[in-house]
Image: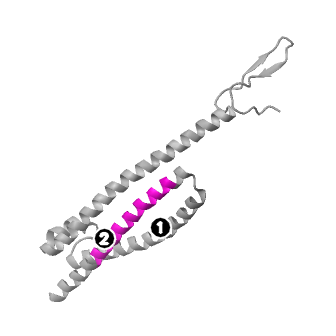
Amino acid sequence: MKTIAIEIEEKVDALLLCLDENVQFLQEGLSRLDELRRFVIKRDDVALGKLLEKIQVEANDHKRHERNRQSIQQKLAAALGYEPRQMTLSALETILPKRRKDQITKRKTEIKSLVGQFRKEHLETVLLLSECARFNNLLLNSIFDLSKVESFSYNSNGTAKRQTDVALINLQL
């Protein structure tokens, strides 16, 4: 019985470390979104490229971390007699002693807060990028007169004349 309690304590400790890593990943993700917006606004293509490379490397770390978290969840569920899907932080809060419950609750609250903040920042980044795309399309359409049907008029001699006063650039040779 005592060995089972020690085993559960060790797995809860591992879970707490894993939750701390989740908090760190979320904080880094918020930082990456901020950097992304800043680089887009500054139009810094080199920094955007480096940021993309950094994100790709971190994605592999995140996958490793997620596999570790799932492994801890499965082992903890087995030790407590739960199905892995049933082993949630809320379920842990109901069965752990107060000290451990408070540690889980603290991290759970922090993760929920960061996830909410991450969703907000992600939405703001998506809106910025969609506005940039919309503005670029408008600019290209106005420069190259892509949004209008080409209009011709005929002079008194019967020769066609393209309307050149609409676009900023006349592509006629």
* Observer-nearest of 90 and 106: 106
Q: Is residue 9 above or below residue 61?
A: below
User: Where does label 1 land, which residue?
Assistant: 59
Q: Is residue 47 magenta?
A: no
Crowding at dot 1, Cα within 10 Å, few <14 / some 14-19 / many 20+, comes out as: few
Q: Is residue 45 above or below residue 106?
A: above
- Identify the amino acid type marked 1: Ala
Q: Quadrant of residue 1?
A: bottom left
Q: Residue at x 53, y 63 (%)?
A: 51
Query: Outermost residue toward the bottom?
Result: 3
Residue 135 pos. (x, y %): 56, 39
SS for dot 2:
helix
The numbered disc on residue 19 is: 2
Q: Residue at x 80, y 21 (%)?
A: 161
Residue 84 pos. (x, y %): 28, 70
State how many labels appear. 2
Quick check: 42 left or right of 3? right
Q: Which residues are magenta?
A: 14-38
N-term-proximal mark, 2 vs 1: 2
- Identify the amino acid type marked 2: Leu
* Observer-nearest of 94 and 75: 94
Q: Is residue 160 above or below residue 135?
A: above
The numbered disc on residue 114 is: none
State if disc 1 and disc 2 touch (CB < 8 Å): no
